[in-house]
Structures are given as structure tokens and as C-alpha cells.
Amino acid sequence: MVVVAAVALWAFEPRRLATSSTIEESAPASRETTPATQAATPTPTDTVPATGKFEDAEHATSGRVRLIELADGRRFVRLEGLSSSDGPDLHVWLSDRPSGGDWGSYDDGRHVALGDLKATHGNQNYAIPADVDLDGLTSVVIWCDRFNVAFGTAPVAA
């Protein structure tokens, strides 16, 4: 019985039910050009090709998502006003599964891992690697790798 309890405490990390963290990162933006450069050529602009709102999955999750494409070609997923539960081994993914689907299905198809979730609350940015094709990726997912479940998902049409 003690061994079972110890394994359960390790796996579920119940202390995380009472923990949270916050981060406030500025939105990514292209570097400004000098006035001489601006006069010589038209300046490309940063764009937001997709936005979405988080939906609950296995855990209550709220906030907004923006896909940001900078004029210099870099791309980011930005989580704004995120509020979610803490959990073990949380990551941010782009997925080809529709938001609001079965909370365990997001690792069944194509997904792109963008990194560990930085905090359970606040505003945060995740770089999308330059070689990633966004065609067909339809949702941003907060994914718990330990239990193979989505905490929350947001629809985005890249």
C-alpha cells in the first residue's frame, strides 16, 4: 500500500493542484528600421494570420492565442491572458486535430512541439521553427506528456 501511494504521489504530483506561476512576456515584433531605410524601400509589416480562444479539455483553461508572423519571417504562437492548471510535464503544441476534440487525441496525428509551458498564467511566446509547414495545423494545445491529455485547446487556422 505504501508503494502504491508513493507511486501515485510521484505520478500525479498533487501539490500542483495548489501551485501556479505567472509570466509576462512582451509580444514579439520586428526590429524598427532607420528612417533612411524606410524611405528607400517599402517596409514589410508584422501580421496576425490567425487567432483563437482556449477551450477546456481535461482542465479548465482560458485565454487567447495569436499566431504572429513578423516582417523578418520569424513566426510565433502567443498565449495571452492564459489561465490553466499546473501539471507535470506540460508543453505547447500545434496540432492537426480540431480544438475541442477528445482530450487524449492530440498526439494521434501531426503535431509540432514548441516547448515547455513557461507558466500557468500570463502572456508568453513560443517560436515556430522556420522549417515547420503550418498547412493543416488547426489548433494550439497545452499538452501533458506524462498522462497524454490536453489541458486546453484553441482553434487556429494557419
Image (tube, helix red, strand yellow):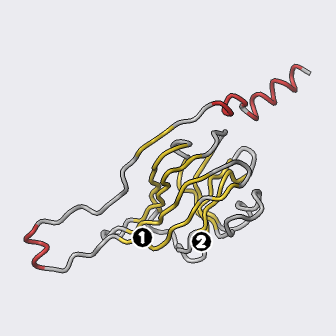
- At 81% from the left and 24% from the top, the residue drawn is 6
User: Badge 2 local density, few (<14 within 10 Å), some, or many (20+)?
Assistant: many
How far is disc 2 from disc 1 in space, using C-alphas?
Answer: 15 Å
Badge 1: how crowded within 10 Å, few (<14), some, or many (20+)?
A: some
- Dot 1 falls on a residue whose secondary structure is strand
Q: Answer above or below: position of 101 versus 150.
A: below
Q: Secondary structure at mark 2?
A: loop
Residue 154, horizontal then vertical, whole percent: 61, 62
N-term mark: 2 or 1: 1
Above/below status of 100 relative to 26: below
Residue under the point 36% across and 51% down: 26
The residue indicated by pointer 1 is: 48
In the depicted structure, whether residue 45 falls above or below residue 145 = below
Residue located at (52% from left, 61% from top): 65
Q: Amino acid at mark 2?
A: Leu
Q: Nearer the viewer, residue 81 or 16?
A: 81
Q: Is residue 22 left or right of residue 94?
A: left
Q: Residue at x 86, y 23 (%)?
A: 3
Q: Which residue is mark 2?
A: 137
